[in-house]
Image: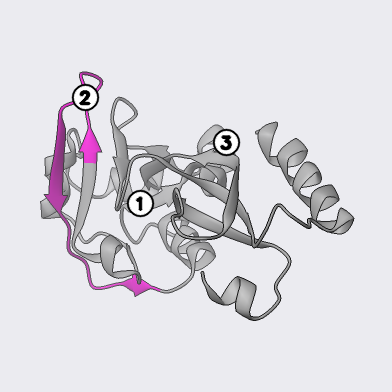
Amino acid sequence: MEHVAAEAIDLAIRLAPAPTGNLISTRLMDTRYRVCASPHYLAHNEDLKVPQDLVRHQCLRFALPEYRTHWRFKTQENAAFEVNVAGHLVITNALSLRRAALAGFGPALMADWLVASDLAEGRLVDLFPNHECTATEFDTAAFALYPSRAYLPQKVRVMIDFLREKLGSR
């Protein structure tokens, strides 16, 4: 993210664990991840009762290295564990990953903000609602990043306030 200051970028949005380094960050919205599958997929494949059952399924995987080989889970008692995942489809775009899950190609790990309406309307099923899940860190969020507090242009302040208002209401 050092290129934000080097390229005179006023504001960047990052979806990840808390950033480190010289940039100033403001948390806009927490992100939680869900392992989801379509009702069609679940009707035609063996049960997915616990996260360990994923090893017997062709999971839809996001193209980032951390998302490809294992997903992390945490129980309500905070016991953390990893499950190795495999699958023939590795997708480079979150919207395409969602579409593949909706089409019944397999379970996928996706951000709650991406699938909230699909879960609410029954197009996708949260497979493990009693678990936290992630591919990287459990504490992830959308962050606004900017180079300095010493001089913060009004347009940047207004945009950060707007994003906080809109994303904070989720």
Task: Say which label, 3 or 2, has the lower sequence index.
Answer: 2
Helix, strand or loop at label 1? It is strand
Please determine whether, in this image, residue 13 is positioned above or below residue 161.
below
Please determine whether, in this image, residue 87 is positioned above or below residue 130.
below
Tell me the amino acid under the disc marked 2.
Asn
**Which residue lies under the disc numbered 3?**
121
Image position, residue 77 (x, y; %)? 20, 18
* Nearer mark to the viewer, of 1 and 2: 2
**Which residue lies under the disc numbered 1?**
109
Please determine whether, in this image, residue 104 is positioned above or below residue 74.
below
Tell me the amino acid under the disc marked 1.
Leu
* Front residue (pair 143, 72): 143
Spatial separation of the CA atoms under disc 1 and disc 2: 19 Å
Image position, residue 167 (x, y; %)? 68, 40
Quadrant where the image shows the C terminus: top right
Q: Residue at x 30, y 72 (%)?
A: 89
Label 3: how many residues lie within 10 Å, few (<14), some (14-19) or many (20+)? few
Image position, residue 146 (x, y; %)? 66, 59
Compared across the picture, whether 57 is left or right of 153 comes to left
Q: Is 89 within the magenta?
A: yes
CB under 8 Å between callouts 1 and 2?
A: no
Spatial separation of the CA atoms under disc 3 and disc 2: 29 Å
Helix, strand or loop at label 2? It is loop
Task: Say which label, 1 or 3, has the lower sequence index.
Answer: 1
**Which residue lies under the disc numbered 2?**
78
Tell me the amino acid under the disc marked 3.
Glu
Q: Magenta stretch?
A: 73-91
**Looking at the rendered structure, which numbered label has been put on residue 90?**
none
Q: Is 170 within the magenta?
A: no
Q: Quadrant of residue 116?
A: top right
